[in-house]
Amino acid sequence: MITENQKKRLRYKMKNPLRMVIFNDQNLHTVGQFRFTPQSLFMLIASVVILLIVAVILLIAFTPLREYIPGYPTGEMRQTIVQNALMVDSLESELAVRDRYFRDIRMLLAGETPPDETTSPDTIVRLDQIHFKKYDHDSLFQDQLSREQFNLSLNNQAPDRKRGISELLFFPPINGVITNHFDAASGHFGVDVVAKKNTRISSVLDGTVVFTGWTMQTGYVIEIQHEHNLVTFYKHNSELLKKAGDKVKAGEAIAIMGNTGMETTGPHLHFEMWQSGVPLNPEDYINF
């Protein structure tokens, strides 16, 4: 243990001034001299060491030299990490969209109305705040509006669901070979059609695109609502050419045939037709 006398001697030595003299070796003339204390010399050395450490840290942090440090990721690796993070974020968003899509489909099939998540609570109107005015226009025009009203009812008890669409002229979504036919008993509610690579897919009727997106099982999907409460699905696409809300005409290109999703083993189109929540056999209406 250091005694008090030893501490005093150490402090004296640290503050005791010293002088360094430089002589010319040939004539012994004084070239220069420096006066310092051990304490000031220690502070000078410590400052130099700290400055060197800071300079090395800045050099490594702001120059490409940091990539030569073992374990430090290279520029390509950092770019890959960022891309993976973006892909994970996109997959989370797609999974959320898929979950909402399947929830809405289940509610529609059950006869319920899916919640409108785009409506702000401040814009919700209470039923007791709605006031209807009597419509006194021409009764013939009223009848026409009643017939053309957009019907989203999912009534499975329709006595003849084919009546009304059997007289429509359907445009083939794609010309090809059917490899898997409609079989409701096995849960295959559509037909699989194989055609040439990058073949365009067309809308079978005039309608409105109500869903476009990507699902884990069926890849890129587009859903179109037509008249007579008819909905068509086009699945496993490689690229979608329309977005939700677009109006399309019969025969208009809406997607490119692909091989996306887990439920596909090769490039093809999986096409479904539903009316009032009931699946229809597309081969009864369309000549592929």
Image (cartoon, grey):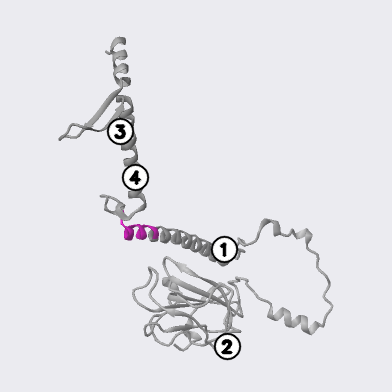
Q: Which residue is mark 4?
A: 55
What is the C-alpha distance between the residues marked 3 and 1? 77 Å
Q: Amino acid at mark 4?
A: Ala
Q: Which residue is mark 3?
A: 45
User: Is mark 4 in CB contact (under 8 Å) with mark 3?
Assistant: no
Which of the two labelled residues, at mark 3 and mark 1, occupies the earlier sequence position? 3
Q: What predominant SS class does the magenta segment belong to?
A: helix
Q: Earlier in the sequence, mark 4 or mark 1?
A: 4
Q: Is residue 280 left or right of residue 144?
A: left
Quarter of the image with the N terminus in it: top left
Q: Earlier in the sequence, mark 2 or mark 4?
A: 4
Could you say which quadrant of the image residue 80 lies in? bottom left
Q: Amino acid at mark 1?
A: Met
Q: Residue 107 bears which disc, if any?
A: 1
Name the residue rendered at 29%, 30% in the picture.
Answer: 34
Looking at the image, residue 58 sits to the left or right of residue 122; the answer is left
Q: Which residue is mark 2?
A: 168
Determine whether the residue tagged by mark 4 lies in a helix, strand or loop.
helix
Q: Are the residues tagged 3 and 1 within 8 Å (C-beta)?
A: no
Q: In the image, which is nearer the foreground, mark 3 or mark 2?
A: 3
Real-space Cα separation, disc 3 to disc 2, in angstroms = 93 Å
Q: Earlier in the sequence, mark 3 or mark 2?
A: 3
Residues in magenta, as a range: 73-82
Q: Could you tell me how far apart the alpha carbons at marks 4 and 1 are, in whole angstroms?
A: 65 Å
